[in-house]
Amino acid sequence: MSLDLVTMLGADAPNVMVEKLRFLGPEIVLFLATCAVMVLGLSPQRALRQACALVAGGGLLLSAVVAQVSPVMETSLFPQFLPYAKTLIAAVGVLMVLLVTGTIDRDFEAEIDRGRPFDAIRSNRGEFYAFLLFSLTGLMLVVTADDLVWLFLALELTSLPTYVMVSISTKRARSQEAGVKYFFLGALGAAVFLYGFAMLYGATGTTMIWGDGTEPGIAQALQVQMAAGGLSPIAMLGIVLSILGICFKIAAVPMHFYTPDVYEGAASPVSAFLAFVPKAAGIIALIYLLSTVGWQWGAGEGSLPDPVRVLLWTIAALTMTVGNVLAILQTSVKRVLAYSSIAHSGYMLVGLIAGPGDGGLTSNGLAASMFYLLCYGFMNLGTFAVLACLERDENGERVELETFDDLRGLCATRPWVGWTMVLCSASLLGVPPLLGFVGKLFLFTSAISAGEIALVIVLGVNSAVAAFYYLRLIGAPMLESPTDHTRSLQPAESPWRVVAGVLSAASVIVLVPFSGVLIRVSSEATSPVEITVEATASAAPIERPDGIDR
Amino acid sequence: MLLALIMVPIVGALLIALGSEKGAKGRAMLTSMVSLAVTGVASMQFDWIQDAAAHAAEPIQLAMSFPVIAELGVSMSLGVDQVAMWLIVLTAVLQPLCVAGSYSAITSRVRTYYAWLTVLPAAMVGVFAARDLLLFYVFFEFTLVPMYVLIALFGSTNRKAAATKFFLYTFTGSIIALAGLVYVAWFQSRLTGDWTFDIGLLAQAAQVMSPQEQALVMLAMLIGFAVKVPLFPVHTWLPLAHTEAPTAGSVVLAGVLLKLGTYAIYRFVLGFVPGAVVEYAAAIAVLAIIGIVYAGLICWVQRDVKKLVAYSSVSHLGFCVLGMVALNSTGLAGSVLYMINHGLSTGALFFLIGFMYERYHTRSMQEVGGLGSKMPIWAFFMGFFAMASVGLPGLNGFVSEFLCLIGTFQSGAPGVGGTPGTLGPWFALVAGTGMVIAAIYLLFMVGKIVFGPLIEPPGHTHDAPLPVDLCGREILILGVLAVLCVFLGVYPNAMLDTLAVPLEAVSEMLQSAGIERGLIEAPAVAEVVEVSGGAS
């Protein structure tokens, strides 16, 4: 069954916009939930205000269901990708909602308890959940994007709400600072890739990525250029600038500088959100953009984007190395996790460099990257959840955990939280047989299949370097003895955070036997198809990027 | 059966972790005895002495398999050959001794200790029994986790650094080895179109790789496995880890964990890329010999007895690797025998040092000496196991060391006794000095701490809850090991008979791979036949 909005809306003549609405079922559900949450957050009744999280979570679950039954996008290079990616986003999104509960409006609610009347102006709860859902909606729209303008708007819809979320996540000044920093650098990043998009438009005369079945898109136009002797400089510049701009979203070198400061400034649940949502948006956008120049690099014929490969290779290697090496030097756990987030972006880029391969499960680098994104979503959420689950007393103010000392002996004092940290860190490190290891294994196999042996070595050495700091994260809760300080830690107000953490830790183990199924689904979703464009003079049919049909 | 061997320790460890602090050691002992019993049953089902035809038909016994991640061809596939089975037996025998040896040494966080100590054999047996590459790798890596915890929590003063160094070295190495192994799997998939991690199938596919590919794969695997052995120059983690680890940790580390490295070399380096092994046999042998001599010389100047024994492991394991690259069945047999013997005698030495440490809280030869007068039983065992380790004829160490050297001598030697190979008398001669050095440093150690005037740490009072000399439990542990040492020394054929056929097959495979690539010459007899055939 497919959810056919065109017939539902009663439009007889298919209009372009209405045609596209068919794919937007999950986004529409999320948008409706967003509107509901915005209103609910302003309700004078506390029970209704507290229903925000419930509505947000319910909306995400519903959108996952809708994503499963929504139609495939025939004009996309990856027709099966939409339902897959949107379900993935919704699944991690639900855990995110569990994790952010209790972040916002704590002082406000406390004042109401003391008898202060409700003041709608001061309530941020509705906005906060609305922004969160907006951002996830934006992420889903990135998935649906088949046009540069759409892609740009979707990327910005993903990011803009997060700037606000960072600023309002705590009452501390450094959150404001982090928000501002994030906003300005984000704007810079957006400007860079928008410039790149404009170049691409200039080089090809269209904003459609793969065409719409009748008109050729950028992919076809660039294929023609490559067949005729190579990408034009302007197209090359466009691709390069787009990649660099999107590096901001995935926190990759050279656009990674904001990461530790922003993650440190935001409340831990929001940091977890930042580490996953914009990264997912960036990775998906990169898959789409890179698909226009193909993944035939190094193969010789018609594979001019060697510069692109070299660029990505360098970015990936530097990102891994910078992230891991700088993480070793940190004293704040949040900064460690921020640098680890940078490093993991580098790992995911390895899959993108490998490309879709010959369609085999283990050689599909895109599938490996998407699978790793899912793994990372869980592992990362678990570690941040631990920081958010407990609070310490700092000058009479209750703040979340931050240093390694706060984690000492947690396995003894608070076993659920402590073991969540141990399992998720071990998985991030890639200790077999946890999920992170399986994720890395797929990156390994795909990169080796693509002949990227040197990159595999870089990845391997980096995984080993990462052991330095992950061992500290594992050792502090598991091996150290609890101190008076750690015994005095109080649980955070929202018990759902522990649930989110424990669920992520469980998924790190439980999903392992299902990794075969997951990678198969992932591989089906990211296997490119041949797109035919009805013959026009300038358009050649796009070939499978792996060139197997030649 | 093999699955039970892996599951029993896991279940046991869970029971220990969830049970009371007090009953932990009892449950650990019970688990290890159950494992031992299961191993006994398994070894009865196992056909130890196969003839060539039976071995060719069923090289892997007790096999079982069910798919885990079918999409990738990953399966829970277990099975053992004679070499693996001996190592499993060694693991099972050492485990109860390790548990018993920790009774008085571990007094705090007892549950944590025994839970991790108990789960360790599951991973080690898993490594030996795995017939699936990924399964092997998972177990191989997983051994790090319990060992890391044991060192980091229960070691002596410098334990954190030692544990971290141990983890980082091995983890780095194994990731690079993984790259090599995955490359083989990918190569296989390109040949057949299907991904599989079945070790048997991969071994066949790997031999088709080009010489250059083989060399690179071998390099990647060696980087990983040499760290574990440890081979010079990546041995530097070992002395620290050994010195800082608790007694039972050192015993397991020396007894079995190091053998994971040599076993992996036997299984994967020799099994997957025999051609490259022949090509680089001399280079590997040089590294092994440097390890033998250099580590031996380091031992000579050690004043910390535990460190001395730790370095002696580096030296001894050099012989083990040397025997393997001799490419003939004599060397291979010596090497496999060495794995078991080293586990017994060095394990016992670590126990002895541990027992001394529990009483004197020092490991320095300058602070203790002449204990023979005070602890005669301990002194007897110290002398006995030092002799076993030196290679006194009649004890186990001698046979294996001798076979390794003979194998090396014959390998590539001209004349009748020579076998195809690239080493030769000179290699054996230099490696042989290692035996002399071993005698020097071990006897020096024994002379210092057993004989001579009694030296005790200043202000030493006997406050340990142990008798001045060894107690019955400790004597039992050492007694069991001593009996095994004598048995294998007097009647090594108990092992050699079982190993003859499988190792002959391995050496034939190695030699024919080398001959095929023109790296070594076929045996003289075969050449004559060929010449006459060509003339007619």
Image (cartoon, rainbow, N blue to C red):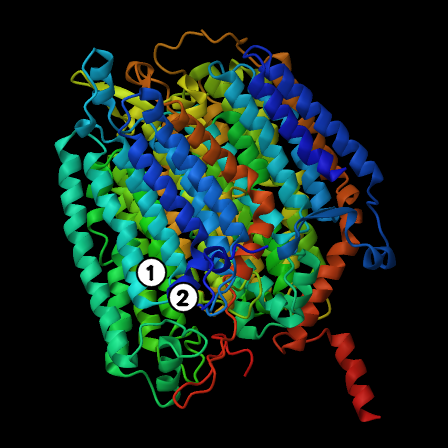
Label pair 2/1, CB-CB below 8 angstroms: yes
Q: Which amino acid does the dot numbered 1 rest on?
A: Ala
Residue A424's quadrant in the figure? top left
Q: Quadrant of the C terminus of chain B?
A: bottom right
Drawn side of residue B504 relative to residue A287, left or right: right
Q: Chain of mark 2?
A: A
> Residue placed at 75% from the left, 80% from the top?
B527
Pick whichever, A32 or B459, lies toward us: A32
> Residue placed at 32% from the left, 62% from the top?
A151
Drawn side of residue A511 relative to residue B400, left or right: left
Which mark is on residue A149?
none
In the displayed orientation, state which residue is furthest to the bottom: B536
The residue identified by callout 2 is A353
Which mark is on residue A316?
1
**Label whose residue precedes the other's in the sequence (2 or 1):** 1
Q: Residues within 10 Å of mark 2 (few under 14, many from 20)?
A: many
Q: Which amino acid does the dot numbered 2 rest on?
A: Ile
Q: Is residue B161 visible?
A: no
